[in-house]
Image (cartoon, rainbow, N blue to C red):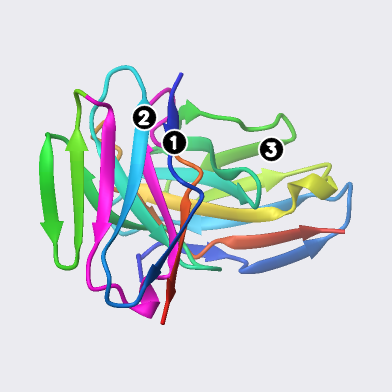
């Protein structure tokens, strides 16, 4: 158990809909990272937050947005969903203080868009 | 940008030794990390090399050669539970850039 929690575990929705994925980092970690993993794309970094502020941005679509709240939990919002958004979404946490640090991954949310 | 190359699949026999290679291209190298991911599970951290040489942690070892932009993960005394995907990763324009992963199948 990494100490990172994610809800929900599974999500099935329809194209055009909007969903929110939630992540709580490990106790003491200030940084949250979001990743998308699909079969042919591997682990794709989406976005990082550190202590409530956006710190790094990866290949995140404009239809996707995220935020980190004062209690450090984070939410990833996916809107106008398309079939291709079906994937595993992982949240990871870390201290955010070093250039390369160990990231602790949550169990993931499996999203299926029908 | 950054790029990492690792074999897509490796098969090895239970009890044997297997080496998973990773070559990388990145600017501002800080170190090479390895993560393990079982099917349906989350990636978990295995090891990190910032300096050249071999780091050993139980049955797993990781090696780095910064001059060759190359590293490998060595798994000894393979067990069936080692069947998983293994990712190398380096920081780049984003906090971590992952390779596409090597799927290790351990067979009896």
Query: Which residue occupies 12% across, 57% down?
Result: B56
Residue, disc 3? A64
Q: Are marks 1 and 3 on the same chain?
A: no
Q: SS for tag 2?
A: strand
- For the residues labelled 2 and 1, say whether their Cβ atoms are less than 8 Å apart: yes
Q: Is residue A101 visible?
A: no
Q: How far across and how far down the image is residue B67, in percent?
A: 19, 23
As rendered, which of A97 and B51 lies closer to the eye?
Answer: B51
Point out the image quarter for the N terminus of chain A.
bottom left
* Chain of the residue under the numbered disc 3 shown in the image: A
Q: How far across and how far down the image is residue A64, in percent?
A: 69, 37
Residue, disc 2? B24
As rendered, which of A61 and B11 lies closer to the eye?
Answer: B11
Please identify, in this view, whether the residue under mark 1 or under mark 3 is nearer the observer: 1
- For the residues labelled 1 and 3, say whether their Cβ atoms are less than 8 Å apart: no
> Magenta span covers which residues?
B68-97
């Amino acid at each position: 158990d990494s100490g990172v929690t994610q809800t929900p575990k599974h999500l099935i929705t329809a194209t055009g809909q909007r969903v929110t994925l939630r992540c709580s980092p490990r106790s003491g970690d200030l940084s949250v990272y979001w990743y998308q993993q699909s079969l042919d794309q591997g682990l794709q970094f989406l976005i990082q937050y550190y202590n409530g502020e956006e710190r790094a941005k990866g290949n995140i679509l404009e239809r996707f947005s995220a935020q980190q709240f004062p209690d450090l939990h984070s939410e990833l919002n996916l809107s106008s969903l398309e079939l291709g958004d079906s994937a595993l979404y992982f949240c990871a946490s870390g201290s955010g203080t070093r250039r390369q640090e160990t990231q602790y991954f949550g169990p993931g949310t499996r999203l299926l868009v029908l | 940008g950054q790029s990492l190359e690792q074999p897509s699949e490796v098969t090895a026999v239970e009890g044997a030794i297997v080496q998973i290679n990773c070559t990388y291209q990145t600017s501002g190298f800080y170190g090479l990390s390895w993560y393990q991911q079982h099917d349906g599970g989350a990636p978990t951290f295995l090891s990190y090399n910032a300096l050249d040489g071999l780091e050993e942690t139980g049955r797993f070892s990781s090696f780095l050669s910064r001059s060759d932009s190359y590293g490998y993960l060595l798994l000894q005394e393979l067990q069936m539970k080692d069947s998983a995907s293994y990712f190398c990763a380096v920081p780049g324009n984003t906090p971590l850039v992952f390779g596409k992963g090597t799927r290790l199948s351990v067979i009896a």
